[in-house]
Image (spheres, grey):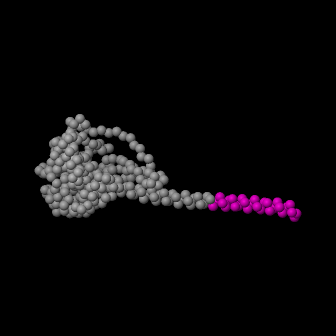
Amino acid sequence: MNENSEDIFDEKKIKMAVKKGKRKSMITIIFVSIIVFVILNIANFAISAYFSQKAFEKWDAYVRLSTPNGYISETVDSRGILGGMSHYKISKDMKIKSIVIEQEQYQFGLNPSVLASRGSGGSIGVTGDDWQFSYKENGWREMLFFHPEVDYKKYKNDEELIKNLEGEKIYEVALSFDQPYKLSELPFPQLPEMTWFWLNTYSNSQLNTFQQEAKEYDWSATFINENKALGFSIRNAYTSTTDMAYEYDEFLKLLKTSQFSEHEKAYNAMEGISIDDVESLGVVVYGTKDEIVEIMKNPIIEASSLGEIIDNY
């Protein structure tokens, strides 16, 4: 074999070696890229899941605090890079069954999805001829509360409305008291299961604001809306000996978890108050017409506001 043949052979060997090296480099790049892709996706999933859970705890606390016997019943996450958006359903426990009342969404994460929504709404009584109700998505109206230490020009009273309703129904009714009562001193022999207790979480400045509004504004717009009243419910029937320490501790945890400014203020106001000194300003009760009307006969009831109505089955 002459020198030219050896040169050609060496050149072929070099080309083969270069091709082999390129293939190995390409395989290495692809392999590393796959590994990096998998790691980044796992990291993104873990980070998004962490922030999604934190956001859920915050919003679930908000819902439980701002909706008597309400809770988030379902969430569906749309995740992007290090964040996303969660669509959720709000349900209300109506003693015999739960009903979906609204659907909402919230953002979460370091890079949350863009949230854009459109809608329109209205209220009843904008002319001052009737109470200015707000309504939930499913058409149920929100209940009205009246602080016992505020002098309102007029109080809501739905007793006659409830008496005139027909059919086997379960009614949700907000009852405002004539004064604050300690939980152990409520003058009721018994209250039904699922009773929700409206607590006195308001500061002096908030109370002064309520009084100023009641003095200056039209009667039809001066009340405390359902989502501004804070409290907790008990599963069993209430008597004067009922221990509600556990429910109260859970209530404080929700206030701390919610992180919304009004709930933070309420937590700061309630943190040093023991269950023995907690005051109730009213209740939300669930029952048949006869059960509700019997409770409303108690002379401490200053106002009553009908909320949801469902069939009793």
Viewer can see residue 68: yes
Q: How many marks?
A: 0
- The foreground one among 230 and 1 is 230
Is 23 included in the stretch rendered in magenta? yes
Q: Residue at x 23, y 35 (%)?
A: 127
Q: Residue at x 25, y 37 (%)?
A: 126
> Looking at the image, which residue sits at the far left?
299
Residue at 32% across, 49% down: 100
Q: Is residue 235 visible?
A: no
Within the image, what quadrant is residue 26 found in? bottom right
Whether residue 115 sits left or right of residue 96 in the image: it is right
Task: From the top left corner, tell me how far across and down residue 166 is, in percent.
Answer: 20, 43
Asked if residue 185 is positioned above or below residue 228 in the image, the reply reads below
Q: Position of residue 95 (x, y in %)?
A: 25, 53
Provide the residue span drawn in magenta: 1-28
Q: Is residue 86 left or right of residue 270?
A: right
**Relative to the observer, which residue lies in front, 3 or 162?**
3
Q: Nearer the viewer, residue 25 or 216?
A: 216
The quarter holding residue 273 reads bottom left
Residue at the far bottom: name it. Answer: 1
Left or right, residue 142 beside residue 154 = right
Q: Is residue 118 left or right of residue 292?
A: right
Q: Please tell me which residue is depicted at 35% across the width and 53% down the height of the picture.
A: 59
Q: Residue furthest right?
A: 2
Q: Position of residue 3 (x, y in %)?
A: 86, 63
